[in-house]
Amino acid sequence: MRVEDFILKNYNSGIESGLVKWESPSNIALVKYWGKKENQIPENPSISFTLSNCKTITELTFTKKQNKEFSFDVYFEGDKNEAFKPKIQTFFDRIEAYMPFLRDYHFKIETSNTFPHSSGIASSASGMSALSLCLMSIERLLSEEKVSDEVFNQKASFLARLGSGSACRSIEGELVIWGENESFPDGSDLYGVKYTDDIHPNFKNYQDTILLVDKGEKQVSSTVGHKLMYGHPFAKQRFTQAHDNLGKLKTILASGNLDEFIKIVESEALTLHAMMMTSMPYFILMKPNTLQIINKIWAYREKTNSKICFTLDAGANVHVLYPEVEKENILEFINNELVSYCENGHYICDQIGFGANQIEI
Ligand code: PMV
């Protein structure tokens, strides 16, 4: 699909009002997206596990109006929220060309997360994907053409990307690729693509326990973070490395070789942070407790031969990844040895998931 193919051409805005609702998960990247070109085009391909329990639930009510200004209200966990409005306004500005009906309606956006507010977990991926799916459901109601579920998901992912890059990987599961690359010819810079190659049973119900080391606001927003890759001294090598790692991961996902999986995943996490430490200005987003946890995970792996590993996003929290067969042992290890490094002892148990769901109302 090309950009032009996402423009809605024929629609009937005769419908006066309606209500749609979706729940959409967060995702955790294995090969990280860090650096973008104009129009939210990634500098390198990425791949993620879709999560299951960390979700945003969004209800969108639309009512026909006369004037042609954008008009919307946002409610977060029941309360009117002004803080989210600028981000949604920017999102509407970016997607208007593809959804011309946006100015015909007033929207009431009611949203909530299953994970605690200010947990340090970014809700942009789940939030932007849930909102995009709601808008797609409205488009489906107004459109004069029938669209397949495949095209529906593709456009939802295309829109979500314009809200927050990594959000394009939250529409489907269990793994999603985003970005053109040599290993997956279907990969696109415009939207995420469901991973359809072989996945070894070792990865079935793969676990992700998120250790909340720092629940505060992100020190570096991803908008600022991606910009740090402009003129970064190691940018070119990093983008090449991401392509290589994606190719290696394809082989690993098919073979189930968890030792090799660990190498790629941990190296990607540390490279992401290394990019931040070597940019200008530079940042250290890990906290002392992040390093304590990493060292404990390495010691546990050495001692027990476990296939536990970690990944990080652009913050201090640690995603602990492991096969389902190790669940009991690793939760015991987390409770005994890692909880003390978490803010207020908090962590969230999640696992690989299957993507967003429409909620009937
Ligand atoms: O989607 P953004 O612009 O918030 O960027 C997310 C970047 C990382 O979470 C650090 C990596 C990734 O691929 O999700």
Image (cartoon, rainbow, N blue to C red):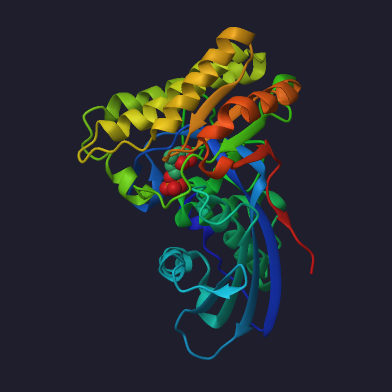
Res. 182 in view: no
Relative placement, left or right, of 9 versus 304 is: left
Q: Which residue appears at 58% of the width and 13% of the height?
A: 301
Relative placement, left or right, of 346 versus 213 is: right
How far across and down, in percent of the image, does residue 92 sit? 46, 68
- Asked whether 251 or 340 is in front, the reply is 340
- Asked whether 345 or 131 is in front, the reply is 345
Total marks in image: 0
How far across and down, in percent of the image, does residue 313 sit? 46, 38
How far across and down, in percent of the image, does residue 3 sit? 47, 53
Residue occupying the far bottom of the picture: 66
In this picture, is 71 found above or below 211?
A: below
Corner quadrant of residue 42: top left
Corner quadrant of residue 339: top right
Relative placement, left or right, of 331 versus 342 is: right
How far across and down, in percent of the image, does residue 1 sit? 53, 47
Corner quadrant of residue 334: top right
Q: Which residue appears at 65% of the width and 53% of the height?
A: 24
Relative placement, left or right, of 136 versus 34 is: right
Rendered-image quarter of ligand 1: top left
Q: Which residue appears at 68% of the width and 57% of the height?
A: 23
In this picture, is 285 found above or below 357?
A: above
In the picture, the quarter occupied by the C terminus is bottom right
- Asked whether 60 or 335 is in front, the reply is 335
Q: Which residue appears at 66% of the width and 26% of the height?
A: 197
Res. 72 in view: yes
Residue occupying the far right of the picture: 360
